Image (cartoon, helix red, strand yellow):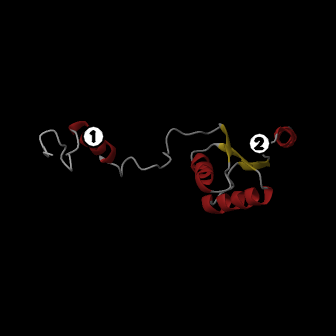
């Protein structure tokens, strides 16, 4: 049996030029593309509803929106964790930011209905 290397593929093949361009484009000025909430445009007078704002990405979203002037309603399943997150945001921002929370589980429609009624009672004069 003869062994031929004529059609055999090399062990390592260099990446195609388009792959290099995509990788370079993804890394180019990555520090400038860092995920930071911009200070412009201002959101004064706007209302934002953030789900899961008591921790992680939701907490940072609430913070960024409040720094830009938006009134934030935080939706959370756990009322105690939501209240603690609101207190932390008030301490972090130093002033009395316009934030409130509504305890509701978005997977339970009865909880959603109760939460919206609770917020409507709080919001109405």
Above or below — where is 7 with respect to 35? above
| Distance of label 2 from label 1 (alpha carbons) | 42 Å
Residue on which the image places disc 1: 19
> Which of the two residues, 38 or 94, is positioned nearer the viewer here?
38
Above or below — where is 70 with respect to 60? above
Above or below — where is 15 with respect to 55? above
Q: Are marks 2 and 1 in contact (CB under 8 Å)?
A: no
Residue found 17% across the figure and 42% down from its top: 8
The answer to whether residue 11 is left or right of residue 40 is left
Q: Position of residue 39 (x, y in %)?
A: 50, 45
> Which of the two residues, 9 or 37, is positioned nearer the viewer here?
9
Quick one: SS at disc 2? loop
The answer to whether residue 8 is left or right of residue 43 is left
Q: Where is residue 78 in the image (x, y as percent from the top left)?
A: 78, 55
Residue found 55% across the figure and 40% down from its top: 42
The C terminus, quarter of image:
top right
Q: Where is residue 71 in the image (x, y as percent from the top left)?
A: 68, 43
Tag 1: Cα neighbours inside 10 Å, few (<14), some, or many (≥20)?
few
Residue on which the image places disc 2: 107
Tag 2: Cα neighbours inside 10 Å, few (<14), some, or many (≥20)?
few
């Amino acid at each position: 049996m003869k062994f031929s290397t004529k059609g055999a593929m090399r062990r390592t093949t260099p990446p195609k030029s388009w792959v290099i361009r995509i990788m370079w484009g993804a890394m180019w000025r990555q520090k400038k593309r860092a995920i930071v909430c911009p200070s412009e445009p201002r959101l004064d007078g706007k209302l934002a509803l953030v789900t899961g704002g008591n921790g992680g990405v939701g907490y940072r979203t609430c913070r960024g929106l409040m720094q830009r002037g938006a009134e934030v309603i935080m939706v959370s399943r756990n009322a105690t964790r939501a209240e603690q997150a609101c207190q932390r945001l008030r301490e972090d921002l130093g002033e009395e930011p316009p934030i409130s929370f509504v305890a509701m589980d978005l997977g339970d429609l009865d909880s959603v209905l109760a939460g919206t009624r609770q917020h409507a009672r709080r919001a109405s004069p």
